[in-house]
Image (spheres, coloured by chain):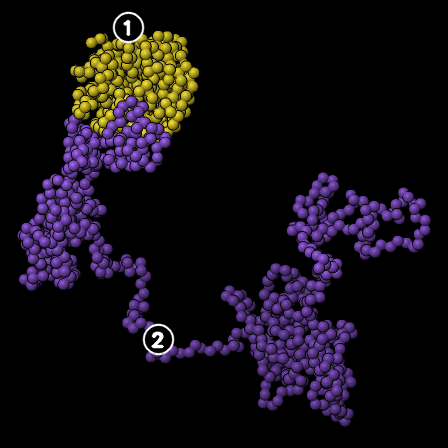
Amino acid sequence: MAYKRPRPPSPTGSQKRSRPSQCYVKCGTPMSLDVDGDDQAFVPVWKQIVTDEHGRRRLHGAFTGGFSAGYFNTVGSKEGWTPKAFVSSRSRRNKDQSSLATQRPEDFMDDEDFADAAESRQLETDQNFAGIGATGESEGARDDFFGLMTTEDETMGVKLMQKMGWRRGEGIGPRVRRSARLDDDKEGTVSMTSESEQLFAPKDTHIKFFTPRKLKCSGLGYQSDAYPLLKPSDSEVKPRVSPALLSIEGVSKHPKPMKPAVKRTGMGVGVLNDNGSDDEDPYELGPRISFNRTIGKDKKAKNPSTIKPSKFAKVSTGQRHMFVPQKHISRTSSSVARLCHDGRSPLRAFKLLTITDGFESRHKLPPPKVPGAWRSSKQVPGSGARAQSFQSVADAARSSTLDAKGRATVLGEKALPGKSIFDYISKEDRDLLAAKTGKNLPPGLGQPLPKQNKTRGVTQPNDLWTWVPALDKGIAAAALSKGTTGWMPYGEDSKKRARYTSFLEVRAGLKDGLPERVPGTTNADWAQELREFAQAAQVFKPVQGLMASRFTSSTSSTPSAHPGSGSGPSENTLLRAPTTKPDDPAETAAKLGMYGAMTRTAVPFHPTRILCKRFNVKPPPNILYESEFGTSASSKTQEPVSKAAMDQMFHEAMTAGSVMQYPLFMTPQAKGSALFSSAEHAPVDSETNEALLKERAPDDVFRALFGDDDDN
Amino acid sequence: MPRFPTRPIARLGGHNGIVHVVAYSSGSSDFILTGSSDRTIRLFNISRAPVDSKVPNAGLVKKFSAHGHEVLSIAVSQGNDKFISTGGDKTVFFWDVATAQTLRTWRGHGGRVNACAFGGEDESVVVTGSWDGTVKIWDVKSNNPKPIITLNDAKDSISDVCVFDADIISGSVDGRVRHYDLRMGMCNIDAIGHPVTSLAVTKKGTETLVSSLDSTVRLMDRDNGQLLKAYRDESFVNTDLKIKSTLGLNDSVVVSGSDNGMVYAWDLLEGEVLHKFNHSERQEVKGKKPSAPTSGKKDVVSAVAFCKTRQEWASGGGDGDVIVWGAE
């Protein structure tokens, strides 16, 4: 929303200095209400600034030539004004109050209000909240004058404790009889006058919370110094703490053990921020009084030999869980008996645990031992050896000695229907090739099948002959001759067709031995196929005359016979070259120059009436067909379309296709005289019907056409 | 038999492309209409265009330009006042000669229209044959924009059409000549065996002259389709282009252009080559061999026309010139 401060459209009277006479009385000084110095005084238009909802200036020099394109000066928002429905009727009057009630306070809030509202929703704890006793924060703020500022309200825990007799600054626990400590600052000079022993409250010590330590597990490639070092800053920058808190001071300030400083500079970490302990949690709360503000000062401090066992170090060594060389430990432990957190020495026969950092402290459990006799249930029995000597597919393929055919036989694939070159090569050529190459080549043309087929076929010839169904020799020969000249079954399966031929040859007496069979089939299957062949030979034996011309040999898609190969017996060259489209006899005659009756073809032609009229010829007789229906067909344009279309169709049916265009000599007889009788001006005798009176065709013609093939 | 005209008497130039068709005017045949691949039809006065004229466009009477494609055929009406022209724009134009305006246009062919002819009594129909394999017959008398009949028997492009009496003859690239006999209502289809490029009918109407792409011109008997005579020459080449052949001198000679720029004249009865002419050189070629067996598109003689009244004929070719050959 663009902001345009509401300003008076004209200078107010007080600002109109040109006319001071209007204002006679002036009480006080006019005060600007706005804090930002923007009183709602009149500002000339050219001085006014339009800002958007973010206070950014818009319309930079809009009135001097430039402008900010967009919606910034129009309606103030991308969506424009939102229309609101206003409904008010006599019965249901839309009161002003109700319409006002629809407005929300957000409608009147600007960005700052929204920001305030959003801020007020943020949940945070009260600054004065404290748990039982003192919080860590207040502990840290106890030193110096920060403690003065500390305001600690009495929490419920404190109140309870106070009711139980506890006072601030005292420790918790039974009272201890000891002499008074007159000087708290000097811990070492404790006067041990036994006569003035009184009961005192125990020392105020922190309860130690054994929080789970953060294990510093680093990832791969983490370069760490082999030896963790003592933090030298601890001994140098030592805060002044009360002696009562001394034993746990280190813990509270350094909850985690120090790692040796690895000089790294990360993004956003300046020199001053770098306190030499990069591994420290950067989000750690607490006073960072251990900032190393001196560059290069830690050099000599890094040397562990320079560390002197001070009195502070003595106390804090064990509590700060740091790795200290053994000599240090021995020295410190021998010199100073370490105390528990409540200031007492540990019980007899007990020893304070010295926790050293590092991975060596975490003893690792070895993986469980697998019993020797154990066997996985997942393992495939017998595959153990294979799994041991794993071979990739490429290696296996390389080491394999099988060729494509060998693999096919291993896999049990059927041979492809395509023919090999040896199907067209004569035996001599094949032998020559085999001798030249020295390979085991498949048999050539007309050669017996390989041994395994032969042996299987020859083993029991006498038994197998019983499987071969009987077929009349004549029928077999006829079917065979039909196959060589014309149509033959099993055109889609050349191998089966070859077996069929072989069966026919056997039955026709052209060949000795058993018919071919598919290698690997059972005798029953073979016999079944042979029976099928016998039936097919019965069915597909050649028919005479017209019937034979209606069938043509199916053409095979496999490549035709190799032209260069030796010409084999006719029974093996069943695959013929695809027959070319039969030439039009008229065209062939014309090519031969036999013009005349051979080349002339007559087809009926149906001129339209209007054409004949234009040529002034008497319409031919076959146009009567048209004029019968349309007696008033004087004009071509008025003729019904259906008749013209019918005429066209009839004409097309007569003339379409070169196959239908019979030479002239066979036209009238072959096509039937009834249809084209008009062309010959044949006198129509209504009394007789030649088609009915014609002699019946011989019976064998009908039998050949429609008779059952099985009955003869 | 009158002497065959062998001397060029006129040269009709000005075409910017191959001359596809040459047509004598009817009547006295004093004018020649030429159609060219430059999309114009020009009307020439033969007598005003001598061979050695230096004047450009000598003898040009009128220019007819309406075609958007090449002009492939022209047929002049008997009255000499109208003519039709067809071409590559699938359209048949019916012209008025005097005003050089198109009176009618017929559209309906699916391809370029290769041939046209007047037909019917008083030339009341126009027969056109097209590349789309159809012969369409248009009615001049009525305002019917559609053809009277469409003969779509041909399996290939129609290359030429002729009308004799009540017979419509069409030659097609599918190697057949179809005789549509309106009186009998029969269509006699003669197979030639090679793509037919030109048709002509004798005056008696009993024979047709058929050019085909086996470099042969044949005279066919129309009654029974028998071959009466075949006209060939060892140098006569017609294997690729649509070459016009015609009959002349009272049907005593056969004249045909050729693919190699020569014009051949055969004796109709004997079948002997009478004359050979080199079109572009405008001279007769004596001897067995043509003077320069030139090759190239420019040297084709695609159109020949014989004057019906005088001993005169014209040849048009790839060089854009039309040469009129006369006896004198």
Q: Chain of mark 2?
A: A
Mark 1: amino acid: Glu
Residue B227 image offset from top left, x and y in percent: 17, 23
Q: Is residue B249 visible?
A: yes
The answer to whether residue B278 is left or right of residue A169 is left
> Which disc, if any, is residue A487?
none
Q: Which chain is yellow?
A: B
Q: Residue furthest right?
A: A24
Q: Marks 2/1: CA distance?
A: 120 Å
Q: Residues within 10 Å of mark 2 (few under 14, many from 20)?
A: few
- Residue B133 occupies which quadrant of the picture? top left
- Residue B82 occupies which quadrant of the picture? top left
Let me know if marks 2 and 1 both belong to one chain: no
Residue A257 image offset from top left, x and y in percent: 60, 73
Q: Is residue A45 above or below residue A630?
A: below
The C terminus of chain B is located in which quarter?
Answer: top left
CB within 8 Å, label 2 to label 1: no
Find numbered disc 2 in the image and state the secondary structure of the residue it sits on: loop
Q: Is residue B162 visible?
A: no
Q: Chain of mark 1?
A: B
Residue A350 image offset from top left, x and y in percent: 59, 88
- Colour in which chain A is shown? purple
Q: Is residue A687 above or below residue A103?
A: above
> Which disc, if any, is residue B328?
1
User: In the image shown, does B22 or A576 lie closer to the viewer?
Assistant: B22
User: In the image shown, does A691 or B236 lie closer to the viewer?
Assistant: A691
- According to the image, label 2 marks what residue? A376
Q: Residue furthest bottom?
A: A195
